Amino acid sequence: MASHFIVEKNFQRLLRNIYEKFSLPPPRYGITVGSSDQFYAFVDVQVPRCSRFMEVITCWDSPSSDSSLSENEAARAAIETLRNELQFDIRDANYIGKNYFKNLYDSASQKYEDFRNEYEMLKKEHAVLKRFHKSLLDERDRILSDWNEIRASIGKCHNLLAQSDIDSMDAD
């Protein structure tokens, strides 16, 4: 029995890794409870503005019934903000691999489709050639039959001429 892998994206860990790479102070998380008993998580991230000053940007999550999910989504929003502010890209190896295999699958699917279309065309051409071959064999059989009939008729004529007492005209 094959086991299924569950990949959980932990944006909080990714945000912490980003802060370590840029040597920034760690982000601060907070949660509030809304009027409909939904959790609203936020994260305060510090972004350098010049050599001495840091700006604190608060990133909020949409309401959620799970506080840890809400914090993770707030971290995701903070990562998106930092990507724009600090101008960096996040390379997702799984996404790159997924795209590679999707392109490979699409290519194989296209080749299969082309092969299938060529096969169908060859099947149609084979059916046409098979009918043409059958008609040629029928025509050959008809010609052989006619030829045998003519040969038999020539044989009959020769026998009739041999049996009769007709002198040949060359004897004159």
Image (spheres, rainbow, N blue to C red):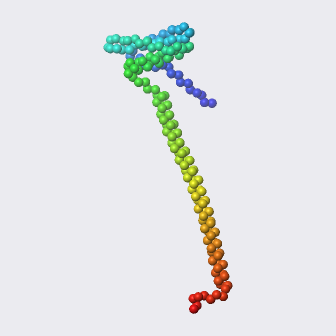
Locate residue 126, reporting x and y percent: 57, 53
Give the position of the N terminus as an image quadrant.
top right
Residue occupying the far left of the picture: 51
Residue occupying the far bottom of the picture: 172
Q: Where on the picture, by quarter, is residue 165? A: bottom right
Tell me: 84 left or right of 121. left
Tell me: 159 left or right of 90. right
Give the position of the C terminus as an image quadrant.
bottom right
Which one is nearer the viewer's eye here, 58 or 7?
58
Query: Does the image show residue 17?
Result: no
Which one is nearer the viewer's eye here, 90 or 1?
90
> Is residue 130 placed above or below 105 in the rendered structure?
below
> Is residue 108 placed above or below 17 in the rendered structure?
below
Which residue corresponds to the image point at 53% horizontal and 9% vertical from the top-left? 34
Tell me: 99 left or right of 132. left
Query: Does the image show residue 47?
Result: yes
Which residue corresponds to the image point at 59% horizontal and 62% vertical from the top-left? 136
Q: Where on the picture, by quarter, is residue 83? A: top left
Which residue corresponds to the image point at 56% horizontal and 47% vertical from the top-left? 120
Locate residue 111, reporting x and y percent: 51, 42
Tell me: 114 left or right of 82. right
Number of marks in picture: 0
Which residue corresponds to the image point at 60% horizontal and 87% vertical from the top-left? 168
Locate residue 140, reporting x and y percent: 60, 65
